[in-house]
Amino acid sequence: MIFRSLETADLAGKRVLVRVDFNVPMEGGVITDDTRLRSALPTIHHLSSRGAKVILLAHFDRPKGRRVPEMSLAPVVAPLSVLLSQPVLFGEDCIGEAAYRAVTALENGDVAVLENLRFHPGEEANDPAFVTELAAIGDLYVNDAFSAAHRAHASTEGLARLLPSYPGLAMQRELEMLDAALGKPVKPVLGIVGGAKVSTKLDLLNNLVRKLDRLAIGGGMANTFLAAQGHDVGGSLCEHDLGDTAREIMASAKAAGCELLLPVDVVVAREVKPGTTTRTCGLDEVKAGDLILDAGPETVKRLLAAMDASKTLIWNGPLGVFEVPPFDMATVAAAKHAAALAVAGKLTAVAGGGDTVSALNHAGVAGEFTFVSTAGGAFLEWMEGKTLPGVAALEA
Ligand code: AMP
């Protein structure tokens, strides 16, 4: 895909509508994690320092097309202003008179946040009339919210069709990294897919087996594959009704020349409780009432060797119940090894998806991966091979 570049854009004096992800965790009007605000800073600085009038558009929570005061974006203004070291204006609405007033008050280099897009039903409906109203207050459009790019909303898709459009710097980096991991990766490419259920990751598994050289399956979903191969998984989380599906995925992998790495040993316990008694055993030693809660040491050893033999890693989903030690062992060992290879320049290690980010943070190595996407749904849809409307609309 070819995109216009912000580097070469003529920005001075231009009103630039920037779609950002300010859907931050908030308690009682106070932001508890400002990662998303920080992610937008490079693009805001870039635009502001080149004399653009920066108009930030975002959604917050799910007001479902109504004005809900508790879902106002006003609480982001002060923290953003501190992070930017410059005043930030607030527009009480994202369209109409209030938006127009806020935008006309801007001098070159100034920054404004406009009120929650989702106070208007036209946002999620991608209503052309709403898109036209948004476009009326801008000259250019920048999308820096990859995490919202799987939705064809007015601010993520519609606007890109009306105004000259550009990916923001965070969006651009995300697209480059995703391309390096799955679009045009350096081979061999290893995938790790873990997490709870096969049923939520069917499209993802089917896409990956066609693209990767090796795919390691872990977590609860590995149990479904083991059961489909005839192993007794005791009382473990397992989708027994998906046996045929698991066998089909194994057949597709074989046909595509993708080597599947399934657990060869497991860690079991009788309950999911920190510090509970555990047992490491082979696949045919799982007893009735046992819960498989982590991958065993031999499985981990094979996974680390597969990383050593790969140039690219793409990872979604933990290998065990990492929230409850000691069932974090396989996930932490794999994360640390991937991080060390990435730091040594031997592996492009890209990971993403909600629980994956927490798992890598838990292992203390998220910062050492080549790239960790915090995009959740958009990251998963991209891993499923789907076209993201917010990305497709930016194509030059
Ligand atoms: P997902 O959202 O599908 O990536 O699933 C993440 C969740 O899967 C985490 O909360 C893990 O605790 C859980 N999980 C991983 N391995 C297992 C397992 N063997 N049994 C039950 N849950 C697991």
Image (spheres, rainbow, N blue to C red):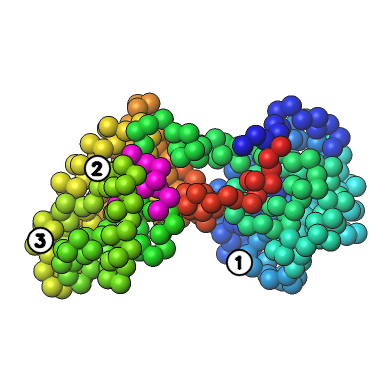
Q: Is mark 1 within 8 Å of ligand 1?
A: no
- Quick check: marks 1 and 3 in contact, CB under 8 Å? no
The circle on residue 303 is 2
Residue 340: quadrant of the picture: top left
Q: Local crowd at mark 1 within 10 Å, few (<14), some, or many (≥20)?
A: few
Marks 1 and 3, Cα distance to the nearest angstrom? 52 Å
In this view, the mark in front (1 or 3): 3
The circle on residue 28 is 1
Marks 2 and 1, Cα distance to the nearest angstrom? 44 Å
The circle on residue 65 is none
Range covered by the magenta-colored residues: 206-217
**Can the viewer see residue 373 in this picture?**
yes
Residue drawn at (29%, 54%) of the image: 250
Q: Local crowd at mark 2 within 10 Å, few (<14), some, or many (≥20)?
A: many
Residue 357, magenta (yes or no): no
Residue drawn at (15%, 67%) of the image: 232
Q: Is residue 104 left or right of residue 83?
A: right
Q: Is residue 261 left or right of residue 119?
A: left
Q: Amino acid at mark 1?
A: Gly
207 up-or-down from 220: above or below: above
Instruction: Report the number of numbered marks.
Output: 3
Residue drawn at (32%, 68%) of the image: 242
The image shows residue 116 at horizontal and vertical percentages of 72, 61
Q: Earlier in the sequence, mark 2 or mark 1?
A: 1
The circle on residue 284 is 3
Q: Is mark 3 within 8 Å of ligand 1?
A: no
Q: Amino acid at mark 2?
A: Leu
Q: Earlier in the sequence, mark 2 or mark 3?
A: 3
204 up-or-down from 273: above or below: above
